[in-house]
Image (cartoon, rainbow, N blue to C red):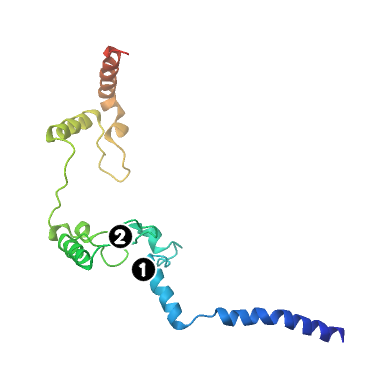
Amino acid sequence: MKLKSTLIVLSLIAAPAFASDQAVSKTREQVLAELAQAQQSGEMLAAGDSGMTLKQINPGAYRSATSTQASKSREQVREELEQAIRTGDIMVAGEFGVKRNELMSGRYPIVAGKSLKTREQVKSELARAIREGEIVAVGEDGRKLNEIYPDRYHAAHHAAVATTSDEVTQAPRF
């Protein structure tokens, strides 16, 4: 008798839990709407074993939830898309993570950026880098020439340090 009463009490306690599961179940349309929203926001897990979301892998492709950007008209968005297609400034399909103009640079016009340095400044920096061995050596290790051949560039390094230290000592102190 005690076993029966215990089972009845447990079933009465468990019944609301089972009933709540049925009330929480979603329709197919609700699930598809959540899926579409997750795809648009980048909250879907990326392919592979990384365990990262698409937004974590490529944050520039998805807008942030706290976007303070003014909304654009449909025509502005179309113009931006057409310009991106013309210049190749759109992502390549697949998991490359590069833009079309980076992958196939010969097919798109070169976008000239404004240089912050003059040609003479760049030439002088290159001459200094060559003189001091600050050029990356050929090979896969990524070391610089002055790291591979310290005896060749040791004197140039000390001369450069001596020149800068002389300038510092000659400068007036306030």
Position in image of residue 94 (x %, y %): 30, 67
Which one is earlier in the sequence, the residue at label 1 or at label 2?
A: 1
Q: Residue at x 17, y 35 (%)?
A: 122
Q: Position of residue 115 (x, y in %)?
A: 17, 41
Label 1 Cα neighbours within 10 Å, binned few <14 / some 14-19 / many ≥20: some
Q: Residue at x 40, y 58 (%)?
A: 56
Give amino acid for label 1. Answer: Gln
Amino acid type, label 2: Gly
Residue drawn at (38%, 65%), measured in percent from left and top?
41
Q: Assign a secondary structure to mark 2.
A: loop
Is label 1 in a helix, a strand or a loop?
helix
* Residue positioned most to the right: 1
What residue sits right under mark 1 in the picture? 40
- In the image, residue 41 sits, relative to residue 36, either above or below, namely above
Placement of the C terminus among the 4 image quadrants: top left
- Residue 84: horizontal and vertical position, in percent? 19, 61
Q: Is residue 41 left or right of residue 81?
A: right
Q: Which image quarter is the N terminus in?
A: bottom right
Q: Nearer the viewer, residue 30 or 90?
A: 30
Dividing the picture into quarters, in which one does residue 63 lie? bottom left
Q: Quadrant of residue 78?
A: bottom left
Q: Is residue 44 left or right of residue 138?
A: right
Tell me: residue 163, above or below residue 11: above
Q: Give coordinates of residue 123: x percent, y percent.
A: 15, 33
Alpha carbons under labels 1 and 2: distance apart: 17 Å
Where does label 2 land, which residue? Answer: 97
